[in-house]
Image (cartoon, grey):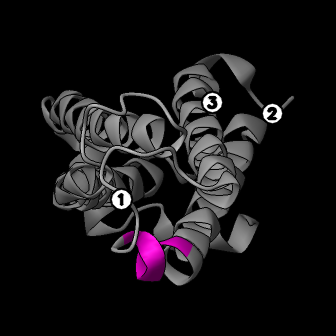
Amino acid sequence: MEGFVQAIEGTAINQWVLGSQWAWPIMEILHFMGLSLLLGSLLVIDLRMAGFFRKIDVGATHKMLPWVFVGFGINMVTGILFVMGDPARYTANIGFWWKMGLVIVAGLNALWFWWKINPVMKTWEPHADTPALAKVIAWVSLGSWFGVLLLGRLIPYIGTG
């Protein structure tokens, strides 16, 4: 990690993030907005897949997926800029690494959904209960993304633990 940190420190992006009075606060705002889009949309989608809100057509909730991707994209860009701005802080932080681990879990879970659930969703009754596998995927998604949220918020406080 030392080589990674040294390679980033002093770069134009690193200097811009640390040298600008407004870069970091604006990135924090954008990161929060991205997370709100991502989690807000996933909350509706996943809770419906978990069997709640049966008055909502299960297929209709997936029209919110573009907002999930927009939110994730905003967070990926701002997250990379945070790391580029202060690489030593992030690479040494156990909370950051746990957060990244949960992002990977969430991504693998999304792939699981795409391969196993998405192809058969069109055959489901719009307001019926969902299969057990859909519920498992929904709860893994909710758990991993809320873990990402909590760990991200704790990064300033956890340290190198």
Which residue appears at 46% of the width and 78% of the height?
Answer: 120
Q: Over which residues does the magenta segment extend?
A: 117-121
Separation of disc 2 and disc 3 at Cα?
Answer: 13 Å
Q: Amino acid at mark 1?
A: Met
Separation of disc 2 and disc 1 at Cα?
Answer: 22 Å
Question: Who comes first in sequence, dot 2 or dot 1?
Answer: 1
**What is the count of numbered marks?**
3
Q: Amino acid at mark 2?
A: Thr
Tag nearer the camera, 2 or 1: 1
Query: Dominant secondary structure of the magenta stretch?
Result: helix
Residue lying farthest top?
157
Question: Who comes first in sequence, dot 2 or dot 3?
Answer: 3
- Answer whether residue 89 is magenta in the image: no
Give the image quarter of residue 106. bottom right
**Quick check: 34 left or right of 80?**
left
- Residue 160: assigned label: 2
- For residue 48, above or below residue 81: above
- Look at mark 3 in the image and give the residue it sits on: 151
**Quick check: 106 left or right of 42?**
right
- Answer whether residue 119 is magenta in the image: yes
- For residue 107, above or below residue 103: below
Q: SS of the residue at dot 2?
A: loop
Give the image location of residue 11, x and y in percent. Answer: 35, 68
Instruction: Report if the CB atoms under discs 2 and 1 are less than 8 Å apart.
Output: no
Which residue appears at 56% of the width and 38% of the height?
Answer: 142
Mark 3: give few (<14), some (14-19) or many (20+) Cα within 10 Å. Answer: many
Q: Amino acid at mark 3?
A: Leu
Comparing 47 with 154, the one in front is 47
Which residue appears at 20% of the width and 29% of the height?
Answer: 29
- Residue 76: assigned label: 1
Give the image location of residue 24, x and y in percent. Answer: 25, 34
Give the image location of residue 37, x and y in percent. Answer: 23, 39
